[in-house]
Amino acid sequence: MEVTAVELGHTAASKCYDDDGRLKRTGTMWTASAHIITAVIGSGVLSLAWAIAQLGWVAGPAVMLLFSFVTYYTSALLADCYRSGDECTGKRNYTYMDAVNANLSGIKVQICGFLQYANIVGVAIGYTIAASISMLAIKKANCFHVEGHRDPCSISSTPYMIIFGVAEIFFSQIPDFDQISWLSILAAVMSFTYSTIGLGLGIVQVVTNGRVQGSLTGISVGAVTPLDKVWRSLQAFGDIAFAYSYSLILIEIQDTIRAPPPSESKVMRRATVVSVAVTTLFYMLCGCMGYAAFGDGAPGNLLTGFGFYEPFWLLDVANAAIVVHLVGAYQVYCQPLFAFVEKWANQRWPKSRYIAGEVDVPLSFSGAGGRCYKLNLFRLTWRTAFVVATTVVSMLLPFFNDVVGLLGALGFWPLTVYFPVEMYIVQKKVPRWSTRWVCLQLLSLACLIITIASAAGSVAGIISDLKVYKPFVTTY
């Protein structure tokens, strides 16, 4: 439900309000970069050593660089679609779906909405799985330290998923994107913490081994069957795609940036350059050092697959940092879905006290004048139900690598490539069959082929996992 400056009784672009009548946005390139890094350097970084092990020293880093370039380029195209028309004064598109609606009409809007929000649900499930495995890894690291490395130390991940779900119920009550910058910055710091620890342990392991492990072509046929080599290589593409995926929330992040000058698109492009460059550097270091340390036997999750056992306390710190980061990343990804459902409910039932009403909850005992939290009952119940649902599904599908690969494959082409390319063509009026139009279409087609192949590899992995899996019973 759009609210204009006139309805609010404020003049456009006043001291407290932006040109659309909303409270002034305060975001900068650095806060936008923090949001992006929080979203991007997530659990995906931990599967990169395994992904490189499937592809080898040549294809692994090359594929990583390819995905970083595609992500940067299409993100720059998407940033230009935040405003329709002039990049400083045009009408704002507050969400990814608003941008699609402004540039592409018809069924494409519904398809985009379904894909975006389905992908967000998938990411929430993936992050719940990853966080539970990291919490479980802390317990296992301590167990291995006391009982020895030969003890299986098998533990169920279900209680840890419940703990993570309870934490997310609490944090999900933060009303909107503008109020989670502190959580995003904290999560970004945590991502650098555990990535640096993983990198350091990899370097130590290489020094201990006395050589760099791995091969030019990755895990060899013989160690796995030829068919498994194909499936695992395709799944590796999906894992790398997931590690770079954040386009589905780019517009929402851009909507937090302060009004021009400079234009939001210019600030967002700078934030994208910084974020993708930093991300790629960390990915290269962590993925390559993990492969150098363990070779073709690189674990699916570098810090929880127990390639490393000691120092156990450092593994505990790294896994605790992963959990804190995923708490923030979960919120960064889910806020657009929360906002969409709540906006729809407000439009559908504008006079409902349950939907639109708020209850002041004092945050201190100082009496009158103390700060209050505005509790909305619909927000409380709907967001709690969402977290509970994703937690239950996570208990049913605790396959870290395969779920990560499938999510990356399904979200990469449509949300990272197809829609940004199509919107840019419309926004900039790129002539059909011109050189730029043909190049953009070829980029989209190539990424579609990669997406289909990656999805097939991940589905094959999930089918293989299901053969030995028992719901709510599987242990690690």
Image (cartoon, helix red, strand yellow):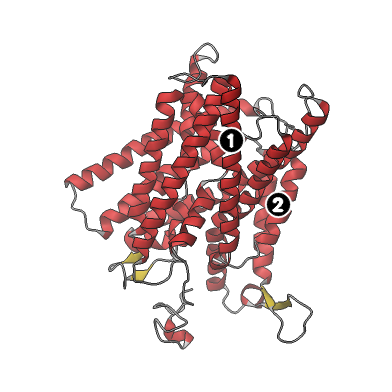
Quarter placement of the C terminus? top right
Q: Secondary structure at mark 1?
A: helix
Q: Answer with the quarter of the image where residue 262 lies.
A: bottom left
Residue 79 vertical placement versus 366 (above, below): above
Q: Residues within 10 Å of mark 1 (few under 14, many from 20)?
A: some
Q: Mark 2 highlights which residue?
A: 165
Measured as percent of width and height from the top left, residue 264 is found at 37, 65
Extreme residue in the right direction: 147
Q: Nearer the viewer, residue 468 or 183?
A: 183
Q: Nearer the viewer, residue 85 or 258?
A: 258
Q: What type is the residue that disc 2 sits on?
A: Gly
Say whether disc 1 or disc 2 marks the residue closer to the N-terminus: 2
In the rendered structure, the answer to whether residue 194 lies left or right of residue 262 reads right
Measured as percent of width and height from the top left, residue 316 is found at 71, 40
Extreme residue in the top direction: 222
Residue at 53% x, 26% y: name it.
291
In the rendered structure, the answer to whether residue 381 lies left or right of residue 67 reads right
Q: What type is the residue that disc 1 sits on?
A: Gly
Q: Secondary structure at mark 2?
A: helix
Residue 212 vertical placement versus 65 (above, below): above
Q: Mark 1 highlights which residue?
A: 200
Measured as percent of width and height from the top left, residue 161 is found at 72, 45
Residue at 40% x, 39% y: name it.
67
Q: Which mark is residue 464?
A: none
Residue 111 can be seen, yes or no: no
As measured in the structure, the alpha-carbon distance from the residue carrying label 1 to the one carrying label 2 is 31 Å
Measured as percent of width and height from the top left, residue 50 is found at 54, 29
Residue 166 vertical placement versus 406 (above, below): below
State which mark lies toward you, 1 or 2: 1
Residue 254 can be seen, yes or no: yes
Q: Residues within 10 Å of mark 2 (few under 14, many from 20)?
A: many
Residue at 74% x, 77% y: name it.
362
